[in-house]
Structure formats: C-alpha cells, structure tokens
Amino acid sequence: MRSTAPWALLVLSLLGARLEAQAPAAADLWRVTTTSLTRPAALQSGTIGVFWNPAPGPAPGGLGLGLEMTQTPDVLGLSGFIGGAGYSPWKPVQVGVIVGLMQVRDLVRTTTSPNSQDGSIPVHELVVGANLGARSPIVQGGVLLALHSQRFDVLEASGWTLDAGVKLTPHPRLRLAAATHFLPIDFSRTHTTDYYLGVEYVVGDSLVVAGIVTRVALSYGATYPGSGDWEHTLAGGLQVGSAVLISAALTSESAYGERSFRAGLGVELFIGRYDIEAALGSGMNDIGPTYRVGIDARLLQ
C-alpha cells in the first residue's frame, strides 16, 4: 500500500461493533481538518461552524448555506468536505443540518507482486447531523445529534454522537465559548472525543491604517483530545475594511510524548452575502500540509 496505509490500519485495528453509541474509529480523520482552522474550534462561526460548536452566532442568520473542502497532498491521500444549511424560523431559534465525508484516496490492493490489483480499497467516514440552537444577545447555545458511518474495504461500523456548545458575549469586545466534539450519545469517553474552549478579545475595532478602518482580534483556544494531552492555540485576525479578513494561528500539540507546533494562515473575503475563505495548515504532527476552501452564503435576511 502507499504511505496512507497507517491511517487505514488505524481504522481497521479500532473497528468496533456495527452500531454503537459512539463515533467509529475513522472519526479521527476529521482531526486533519482542524489543522487548517485559523481560530480556535470553539469560536468557529457561520453555517459550517456548528460542526465544531453547535451554538449559533449572536445575530439572526436567516437562511445560511455552506460548503468546505479539505485536501492534503497525494502522499497523504486525504480529502473531504462538509456541507450544511441553517435556518432561523424565529429570531431566537436556529435549526440546521450537516453532512460531511472524509476519505483516504488511492489505497490499492496488492499481493506478493509489486504491481497493484484492479480496484481500490474504500476507506471513509461519513457524518450526518441535525442541529438545534437558540440565541440571545449575550448567550447562545445549541446541540448537534450526528450519525457516523465508516467503511474500511468490506468492513463497516456506525455510531451516534451528541454534542453541545455555548457561546457567551458579555461585552461587545469579548467572546467566550466551549463545546464538545463527537461525544458518544451514552456519554462514555472515547479517543475520538474532543473538548474545546475558546476566548476572543477585540483589541481594536476602529483602528485607521492608511486611511482604512481595521479591526484586530486576538484569541486563545484549548483542546482536550481523547489522547489526554492538551493542545493550545494562539490566533489573531486582522480585518481590513469590510471586505478582507487575514487570520493566523499557532498551535502547540503533543505527539509521542513530545511537544511540536503547527501554524495556520487564512484569508477570507466578504462579497455581499457571500463569505469565501481559503486556509492552509502546516499539518498534524508534521505529516504534511492541509488545504481548505469554503463558501458561506447568507440568504433571506
């Protein structure tokens, strides 16, 4: 097999029952997408943001549609997408759906011959979820119920997760957030579950640089993964006028008992009702970069 085989072997070695009250082992693949986030996961916003924190944003969203694509180099062979829709039937309430797929590409069958056999080996994790959230000017909260399905060649497994999140805006310059990610529906703790914390402070929202009004925000995030080693993220965002947001993040992570760092850089464009984002992460545990592009449309506002 190609160098993506370790991911596939991880999935195979941790396969559980066909239907359990927890995400299957392949849910680990979604951690690759987190390496391209340029702000703490608990503070993610927009239609796709409920995948990381089920709490909606503080402002009514009308109808939102979002799509994000993730890609790694061929040497890793990972790719995926997250799509979603959110709607506010009443101003305080938001409902939505999320669909995501992460897969390992180009795994081929071999025998004792070095030549590959016909057909590839399917390895993927599919997640489908429903979101319910409520908002006030200060407090926003929500839950996300998700069904997971994984496949490794002819082997399959499924499971349920129930996540909750909260966002607090006690001051226009300050935001606090906390969320679970892939928490088993029976509240048992597994290696696929992450716990997110985040805080953001707007240093200046009316700074004038070269005649352009800019906004500067700094944030800190902490992740407690199933492995039990805390990850810490420092991030900053510079919004130039009302059209461009440049963001960067530096994360300290632990692997094999050693600390390492990964960086992320993103650019977001605001064009009318559309937000377009492109981001690059240096990769998890130095295994290679992660590329992410996304679009979020706000309609019926």
Image (cartoon, helix red, strand yellow):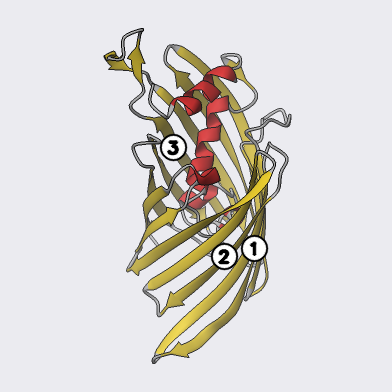
Question: What residue type is disc 3 on?
Answer: Val
Q: Are marks 1 and 2 in contact (CB under 8 Å)?
A: yes
The answer to whether residue 148 is above or below residue 193 is above
Residue that badge 1 annotates: 220
Asked which secondary structure carries label 2, the reply is strand
Q: Are marks 3 and 2 in contact (CB under 8 Å)?
A: no
Instruction: Report the mark closest to the observer, 3 or 2.
Output: 2
The answer to whether residue 122 is above or below residue 282 is above
In the image, is 27 to the left or to the right of 166? left
Residue that badge 3 annotates: 99
Image quadrant holding the N terminus, namely: top left
| Residue 225: percent from left, percent from top | 67, 41
Q: Residue 236 carries which label?
A: none
The answer to whether residue 208 is above or below residue 82 is below
Asked which secondary structure carries label 1, the reply is strand
* Residue at (42, 15) in percent of width and height: 153
| Residue 249: percent from left, percent from top | 54, 62
Residue that badge 2 annotates: 235
Asked which secondary structure carries label 3, the reply is strand
Question: What residue type is disc 2 on?
Answer: Ala
Q: How crowded is mark 2: few (under 14 residues within 10 Å), some or many (20 or more)?
A: many
Q: Earlier in the sequence, mark 1 or mark 2?
A: 1
